[in-house]
Image (tube, helix red, strand yellow):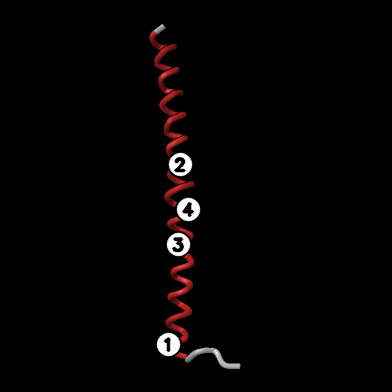
Amino acid sequence: MSAHRQGGGDRVRRRRMEIFAFVFLTFVLMPALAVGAVGSYGLGVWIYQSIAGPPTH
């Protein structure tokens, strides 16, 4: 019986870890990557324009 209960505890712990991983990926990692990507692009454009000058018509 204890082996059966232990297996159930492992499933609960695994489920909690999966939920934690989902929440971490959804609300921490992906927004941080999005901000980093947009910020890097903006920095690159800013550096390019400081070297090459602003776009002209």
Residue under label 4, please give it: 30
Is 25 placed above or below 45 here? above
Spatial CA distance of label 1 from label 2 is 40 Å
Q: From mark 4 to mark 3, how far is it between C-alphas?
A: 9 Å
Report crowding for label 2: few under 14, some 14 to 19, many 20 or more residues within 10 A (C-alpha).
Answer: few
Residue 29: x %, y % from top left? 43, 51
Q: Disc 3 or 1, which lies upstream in sequence?
A: 3
Q: Quadrant of residue 8?
A: top left
Q: Secondary structure at mark 1?
A: helix
Which label's residue is closer to the chain start, 4 or 3? Answer: 4
Badge number at residue 35: 3
Question: What residue does disc 1 label?
Answer: 50
Q: Tell which of 17 and 57 is nearer to you.
A: 57
Amino acid on which disc 4 is placed: Met
Q: Residue at x 41, y 6 (%)?
A: 1
Is label 4 in a helix, a strand or a loop? helix
Numbered disc 2: secondary structure: helix
What is the count of numbered marks? Answer: 4
Q: Position of residue 46 (x, y in %)?
A: 44, 80
- Nearer to us in this view, 4 or 39: 39
Q: Please name the residue that numbered disc 2 is placed on.
A: 23
